[in-house]
């Protein structure tokens, strides 16, 4: 093949494979002759000085020509790369002006198929810079044409607009920063603003499109390896967090089934705030297309905290059992008192198996959403249905609940298979009358992503401020001293109601207790609450509203009776530790006691974790002092020797140094191939293309014309209205 023919083919194809042995030999001979006769001028590069110039790599050649183009006012791009058929190695590369050639015409230009075309950029410029490979592996310029058929940009600010000179977004530093900002949660438009604010004025601004391209390239590079990266990330975190816990469930082929993780801070939070757990499955909100399942609770400020997270293969009962068992193991076999979930049968069955003594409650948010949907036909048919339903659902006692159910079932002819009947059958999971004996610190709508920084802010504000009291009563003063800032505001509201808006009537009085009916004068007495004050040495008061039992804060009705009975302080047994500042997370400053941590079966995992935590704190506080470390070591050696003598166990040097509840680390990465899920997981969530019948809440309202009352359009586009307007205007003219 001749050189002319090769050039013609290169213009037609971006990358060409040719049998070029003869061509290479001729090229090398030509290069040697040219190399011997090159003369470089001191005034700068010209055609003669550039021809024959030698470079170590193609990147060096590209950078040279790009710098040349910047000085002379144009941009460049790679036009063709010729490769050897046998080795697939490039032997020739052609760079051209970015205005070279012409834009290809779209063959489908028939009427109706025309697309919006961009302005033309390429105008057939012939300027080019071609390099070929020498026998020694270096590259030389064997063809150079500096003839342009367009005006050149002679100001740096304009030249920088050419793509080849906007190099900043392609640098490794910029790409790395883009990836880090994206991992931190920023969108491409936000990344663009951040990078442009940091760069120098000599660089062209980065665009959102360039950010998208870089991130897309990075995702392609990591495609199929993200799950491996997740496990590696958890292992890396375990190196700096001794209490990090995670477990991975893999198929035999390396496909992930389930993964659960919780860091040390989350586990510590559970020991203090794990009385109530909210569990939810958020469908398809991660790159693996697996259901994400967070465990959340509420801290002493009323803020949401995260106890752990999981990615699940599916939403079957056995999957939830696997997850709950590992959650329980992670949390030192400490059972939650209550679990709030949605109305999923498989999830409910798994809770019965793993947490048999925990109270299972349905989340109020989902129930209210379904109420709007399922009660609409009854509300439209019966004018008093909504009030009757509300009274039934909000019944104070089980007796009231059951009696009112019989009334609404018969009065409104409820069918046995309707939603309301199904909710009655599951009443123990949601009805107020059945949940008044269990502490529920959260409602579902409060279970949002945890923000530990916000918790630290609230700790600081509580410690560095004093509460503003509404009275001088010692009950309020004690509450202000003990409670966190947010919780005291809730208590204060109840206290102010108790001291200003309530009254009472005595129902009964014995030697053991006094019963009061407490409420506001302007409210019907059927809504007043029954408060029982027990006449004993220890102050004991109960209220039918059960606010303390469910929320952990005394209600206004009890506070009213306490004030009336001249109780001079807030009893300590009515101050839950979880609502106090003492429940805050402290790094290396708190020793954990062993009160009420053991059980009849011996030392619990929670006890062992607390002891190890105390041991770690001793080491951390003594590490700066050689004498303290020596004292700690002597104490431990003495203890180990005493144990060896008493138990006649192994010598001291053979005692295991491992942690009693160490993380379940999956250290199989070098041996086992871990790959990403092959396809999106089928979940119980709504698919993107829903096949079910939409509820009245989801069906959008049809457009209705206010002029002709027709559907599908508004009055502004109504054809009848336009005709009338035209007729009226014609009549006015005549």
Image (tube, grey):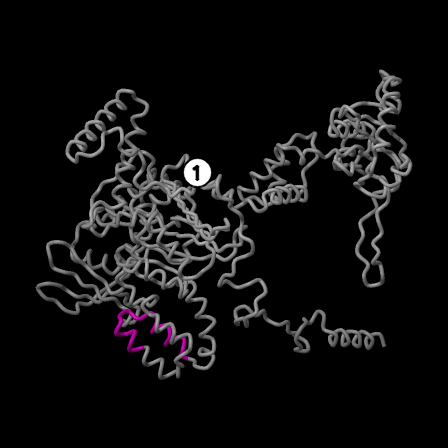
Q: Residue at x 50, y 61 (%)?
A: 683
Residue 569 lies, in percent from the top left, at 19, 49
Compared to 632, does 324 lie above or below?
Answer: below
State the extent of the magenta-drawn residues as a range: 384-404
- The part of the image, by quadrant, that contains residue 174 is top right
- The part of the image, by quadrant, that contains residue 338 is bottom left
Magenta highlight on residue 393: yes
Magenta highlight on residue 388: yes
Residue in front for this viewpoint, 572 or 98: 98
Q: Determine if residue 731 is in view.
A: yes
Category of crowding for the residue at label 1, using alpha-carbon neighbours closer than 10 angstroms: few (below 14), some (14–19), many (at least 20): some
Q: Residue at x 35, y 73 (%)?
A: 424
Residue in front for this viewpoint, 359 or 36: 36
Q: Determine if residue 78 is in view.
A: no
Compared to 631, does 218 lie above or below?
Answer: below
Left or right: residue 366 versus residue 20 is: left
Q: Residue at x 57, y 62 (%)?
A: 688
Compared to 709, does 645 lie above or below?
Answer: above
Left or right: residue 101 versus residue 193 is: right
Per the image, the residue denoted by label 1 is 237
- The part of the image, by quadrant, that contains residue 689 is bottom right
Residue 257 lies, in percent from the top left, at 47, 53
Residue furthest to the left in view is: 511
Magenta span main SS = helix
Residue 618 lies, in percent from the top left, at 28, 30
Residue 56 lies, in percent from the top left, at 74, 24
Left or right: residue 637 versus residue 140 is: left
Q: Quadrant of the N terminus?
A: top right
């Amino acid at each position: 093949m001749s050189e002319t023919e090769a050039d013609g083919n290169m213009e037609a194809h971006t990358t060409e494979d040719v049998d070029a042995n003869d061509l290479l030999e001729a090229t090398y001979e030509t290069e040697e002759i040219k190399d011997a006769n090159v003369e470089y001028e001191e005034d700068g590069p010209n055609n003669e000085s550039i021809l024959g110039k030698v470079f170590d790599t193609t990147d060096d050649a590209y950078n040279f020509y790009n710098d040349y183009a910047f000085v002379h006012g144009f941009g460049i791009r790679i036009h063709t790369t010729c490769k050897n058929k046998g080795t697939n190695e490039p032997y020739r590369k052609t760079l051209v002006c970015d205005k070279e050639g012409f834009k290809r015409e779209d063959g489908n230009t028939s009427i109706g198929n025309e697309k919006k075309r961009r302005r033309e950029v390429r105008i057939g410029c012939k300027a080019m810079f071609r390099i070929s490979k020498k026998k020694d592996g270096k590259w030389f310029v064997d063809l150079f044409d500096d003839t342009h058929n367009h005006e050149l940009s002679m100001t740096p600010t304009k030249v920088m607009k050419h793509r080849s000179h906007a190099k900043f977004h392609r640098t490794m530093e910029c790409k790395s920063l883009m990836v880090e900002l994206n991992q931190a949660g920023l969108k491409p438009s936000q990344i663009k603003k951040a990078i442009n604010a940091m760069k120098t004025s000599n660089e062209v601004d980065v665009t959102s499109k360039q950010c998208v391209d870089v991130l897309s390239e990075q995702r392609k590079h990591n495609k199929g390896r993200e799950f491996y990266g997740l496990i590696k990330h958890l292992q890396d975190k375990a190196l700096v967090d001794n209490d990090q816990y995670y477990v991975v469930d893999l198929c035999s082929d390396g496909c992930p089934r389930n993964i659960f993780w919780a860091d040390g801070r989350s586990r510590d939070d559970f020991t203090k705030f794990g009385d109530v757990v909210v569990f939810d499955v958020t469908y398809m909100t991660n790159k693996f297309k697996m259901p994400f399942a967070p465990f959340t609770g509420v801290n002493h400020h009323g803020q949401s905290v995260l106890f752990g997270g999981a990615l699940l293969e599916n939403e079957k009962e056995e999957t939830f059992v696997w997850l709950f068992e590992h959650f329980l193991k992670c949390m030192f076999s400490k059972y939650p008192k209550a679990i709030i979930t949605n109305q999923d049968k498989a999830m409910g069955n798994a809770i019965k198996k793993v947490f048999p003594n925990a109270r299972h409650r349905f989340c109020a948010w989902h129930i209210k959403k379904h109420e709007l949907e399922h009660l609409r036909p009854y509300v439209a048919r019966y004018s008093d249905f909504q009030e009757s339903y509300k009274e039934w659902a909000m019944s104070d006692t089980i007796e009231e609940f059951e009696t009112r159910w019989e009334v609404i079932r018969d009065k409104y002819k409820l069918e046995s298979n309707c939603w309301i009947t199904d909710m009655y059958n599951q009443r123990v999971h949601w009805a107020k009358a059945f949940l008044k004996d269990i502490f529920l610190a959260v409602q579902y709508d409060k279970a949002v992503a945890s923000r530990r920084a916000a918790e630290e802010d609230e700790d600081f504000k509580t410690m560095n401020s004093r509460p503003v009291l509404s009275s001088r009563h010692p009950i309020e003063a004690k509450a202000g001293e003990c409670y966190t800032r947010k919780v005291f505001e809730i208590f204060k509201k109840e206290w102010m109601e108790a001291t200003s808006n309530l009254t009472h009537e005595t129902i009964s009085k014995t030697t053991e207790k006094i019963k009061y009916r407490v409420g506001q004068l302007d409210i019907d007495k059927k809504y007043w609450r029954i408060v029982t004050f027990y006449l004993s040495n220890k102050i004991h008061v109960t209220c039918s509203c059960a606010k303390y039992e469910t929320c952990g804060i005394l209600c206004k009705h009890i506070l009213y009776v306490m004030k009336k009975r001249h109780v001079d302080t807030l009893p300590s047994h009515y101050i839950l530790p979880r609502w106090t500042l003492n429940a805050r997370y402290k790094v290396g400053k708190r020793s954990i006691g062993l009160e009420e941590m053991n059980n009849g079966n011996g030392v619990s995992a929670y006890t062992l974790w607390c002891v190890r935590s105390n041991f770690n704190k001793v080491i951390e506080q003594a590490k700066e002092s050689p004498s303290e470390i020596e004292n700690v070591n002597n104490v431990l050696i003495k203890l180990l020797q005493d144990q060896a003598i008493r138990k006649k166990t192994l010598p001291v040097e053979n005692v295991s140094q491992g942690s009693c509840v160490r993380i379940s680390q999956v250290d199989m990465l070098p041996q086992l191939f871990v790959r990403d899920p092959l396809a999106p997981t089928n979940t119980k969530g709504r698919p993107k293309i829903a096949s079910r019948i939409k509820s009245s809440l989801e069906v959008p309202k049809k457009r209705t014309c206010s002029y002709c009352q027709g559907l599908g359009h508004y009055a502004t586009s109504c054809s009848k209205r336009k005709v009338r307007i035209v007729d009226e205007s014609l009549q006015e003219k005549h």
